[in-house]
Amino acid sequence: MWYLVIVVRENPLDPKAMKRLRTLSWMSLEQLERLASAAEAVRIRRPNTIFSEGQSSNRVYIMLSGVAKLSILNREDRVLVGLVGPGEVFGVSSLLPNAIRPFRCDAFTDCTVAIVQPEVFVETTLGIQRELLSRVLDATVGRWWMMLVRYANFVGLGLRERLAGALLEVGNKFGVEDSRGVLLTLKLTHEDLADLVGASRQRTTVQLKEFENEQALIRDGRRMIIVPHRLLQRSAERIVAPAQIQRSIEQRSIENVSQQVHNAKRSQAPLPGSRNGR
């Protein structure tokens, strides 16, 4: 089904109307005037998308009227995470450094949304630089945000995908680069990993053995080395790698391509004594 009208630009925001919203009522009229002058009001028709997962998180949204829904894609099914009502501030992952949208947001009813840059939102509401707030949030609530995203991703996933996702997250936080992959500096037992993904130790042990057979997990004595690209390639379900792990995978891909090009050039070099090699 096609929708001809996706968004409609609204008239300039009314600071007095914004102050009537319970979540914004604590702000002074002067603050709301600055916020209103910097924000853009957009009307979004149901059921069009406000933002999608995987996009760079670079805007803060304020629901002025209507209802939106947040969802996450697991397997081929979209799982509802929550609803956003009038006055709510959402898209707050933009307040964290280098964030990517983990959820998709769609208009559940026709909505009017104020969209503002996170720098403006933070400086107007708190009077500080966004960079300073991002550092504080990253060191405090950042881990809880990752926990929320992890468990939202776990809904509907099998043990294999849950365990792969957990290993990638642990590697991102407690891993160091190794020529073979990412070496986990934190010693985790099979029972620890089982608790982390909500499964029995026996089933977790069987799945870890499968990862070893696929060379997605390497044992080095009592230490574990995860091979991120193998965990991702061999998982049938959708798993989002943490940013640091993803950069490592991309760097290894570049190095592999460079090595292949180098080897190809060597194989094309003329042999000694040939006509071209004289």
Image (cartoon, rainbow, N blue to C red):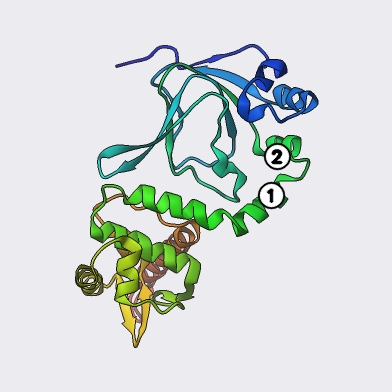
Residue 35: give x, y in percent of width and height.
72, 27
Task: In this rendered view, identify the residue nearer to me: 21 or 252.
Answer: 21
Residue 256 is drawn in which quadrant? bottom left
Picture layout, residue 237 above or below residue 229: above
Q: Are marks 2 and 1 in contact (CB under 8 Å)?
A: yes
Task: In this rendered view, identify the residue nearer to me: 261 or 79.
Answer: 79
Residue 133, numbered circle: 1
Please name the amino acid that badge 1 sits on.
Answer: Leu
Task: In this rendered view, identify the residue nearer to me: 262 or 109.
Answer: 109
At x 70%, y 39%, the residue is 122
Whether residue 60 is visible, yes or no, is yes
Badge 1 density bin: few <14, some 14–19, many ≥20, Cα 10 Å: some
Residue 80: give x, y in percent of width and height.
35, 36
259 left or right, relative to 41: left
Picture layout, residue 13 above or below residue 156: above
| SS at badge 1 | helix
Q: Quadrant of the C terminus?
A: bottom left
| SS at badge 2 | helix
Residue 122, numbered circle: 2
